[in-house]
Amino acid sequence: MQTIQGMWPTIGRKVVYGKGEQIFLQGAKQRCLYYVEQGAVEVAFGQNGTTIAVAYIGPGEFLGETGFFDGASRVRNVRAAEPTVLRIYDWASMEALRSRDPHSYALFITDVARSVCAKFRRVLDEREPLTAYAASLSTGRRQFHEARPVPGHFFRTPLGGSIVELVEKTKADLFDLSYAVQSIGKDGELNGLQERCTSIMNHLNENLQDMEPLIAQSDFQDVVWGYIFKEVFPYLMRSRFAERAYYKPKGYAGDYLMMEMIYRHEPSGDGKLGFLVDAWCLNAPASRAVRGRRSLLAEELKRRVLERTHTSDPIRILNLACGPSRELFDFLKSCPETHRVEATLMDADVEALHYTNTAVNTFPHRATIRYLNDNAVRWALGRTRQELAPQDIIYSAGLTDYLDRRLFTALVRRCYEQLKPEGCLIIGNFSPQNPNRAIMDHILQWKLIYRTEKDLRNIFAETPFGHRVSCLCEPEGINLFAVAYRGSENGPRKSDSATSSRGTN
């Protein structure tokens, strides 16, 4: 801001803060306005013992405007995120300026007002953070509303007859299974019945996968899926997994509690039949892929960090749409130099961040962990301003499954800008090879945007990464990961020029 810069020699006092040093605490009454000359400050609040950042403010930005004008106590904790130089304007000195030089005072206050207006607009945009996050996703919202009658003549076609036969057989088999379950005592063994349930659900899943392209070619796609949904829904909803996936209590299916449900792999449901169906859901290929990607990412983080052992600089990691961040803490358990790791976990869900701090970050280590409450999609589009230091590694396990090509490309570009030279980006996306796609899409309404290795390469080719990308996948071959490095100041890494894949089908 040119106005403020011109006033520096005459108003305000310069204060230098060390990294981590507190500037002011929530509840403090300091009628001061702060302007960042150098460095960055973290604005945060406490949630049941978890410090959650809401903004990182960098050079050229104000903070503390509200407390300056109304004199009320501060509502956030603010500390230096790195060595920082602030210009501080207290109420008395500004009143003196108003009396001495009204014109300069008016210019100053105009700049402050612009800052307040910009923040106010951002607050309006994000007044319902989780709703806004779900709305920013290209898919993932429940779109099926009601089942409409299927024209009678459809069931007389070969496809219609096959669908009716499949649905009726599934219902009959599950009904028989539920009867068998009731005959088992309270502590009875379910292993034999689990195999029976798995066979029934696999038969339904495999046939729906085969029928999906045929249904898509018919004139009654929506009503046919509505019929299938209506008939099998009561049985699937006995599963806690299926219930949460369908009802999406946070507005999108893949929230942190869903990830934890998959990681724990402990079936639960309504009655013993619900337990059996839930066990099938949790052991389906898509769920195994989620567990597999956790292991893959932990290993990749370890590998990329080992590439940086030749320096003593901090190793900065940014996890976008982080969820419970299990893979990061798995990595930290085996990392010999945790004191060098500075990880920022970004998520739109405050509860996810608090859960990670209290239920996942529970073992001794020396890493610095920051929890940032922000919408990764809006961050990618430049609609939120966070003064984050350049990162060594940026990764996201499942965000782009919900982003269309425009948003995906914007995310990759934004990550490129945020990386250090030779920094690494790792982005995950489910492939069309998901064997559970039909049930996820049409029964659970858990819709993803599936991409092949070629699709991922084409997206990266439209960004500054160009063709310097490789692809990995977890053991199921379902969850792909694109890995790309930002070129160094002396040109691209030699290892990046290769385009061969490791671990893909």
Image (tube, helix red, strand yellow):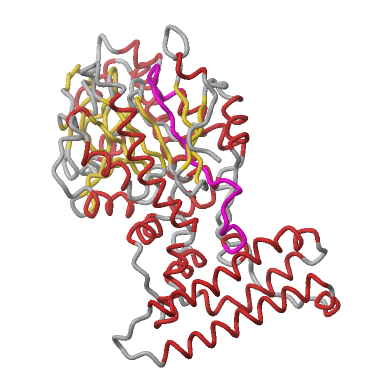
Residue at the spot x=62%, y=34% of the render?
454
Q: Nearer the viewer, residue 148 or 129?
A: 148
Residue at the spot x=19%, y=17% of the render?
13
18 w.r.t. 338: above or below: above
The percent coordinates of residue 282 (x first, y second) are: 43, 64
The residues colored magenta run 417-439
Q: In the drawing, does residue 170 fall left or right of residue 388? A: right
The percent coordinates of residue 68 (x first, y second) are: 26, 34
The percent coordinates of residue 167 (x first, y second) are: 66, 77
453 w.r.t. 173: above or below: above
Q: Nearer the viewer, residue 424 or 173?
A: 173
Residue 133 falls inside the magenta stretch:
no
Tell which residue pokes out farthest to the top in this image.
490
Tell which residue pokes out farthest to the bottom in this image.
183
The percent coordinates of residue 110 (x first, y second) are: 41, 25
Q: Nearer the viewer, residue 106 or 485?
A: 485
Quarter of the image containing the C terminus? top right
Residue 428 falls inside the magenta stretch:
yes
Q: Nearer the viewer, residue 313 or 19?
A: 313
Question: How many tags in the picture?
Answer: 0
Quarter of the image containing the N terminus? top left
309 w.r.t. 160: above or below: above
Q: In the drawing, does residue 64 fall left or right of residue 482? A: left
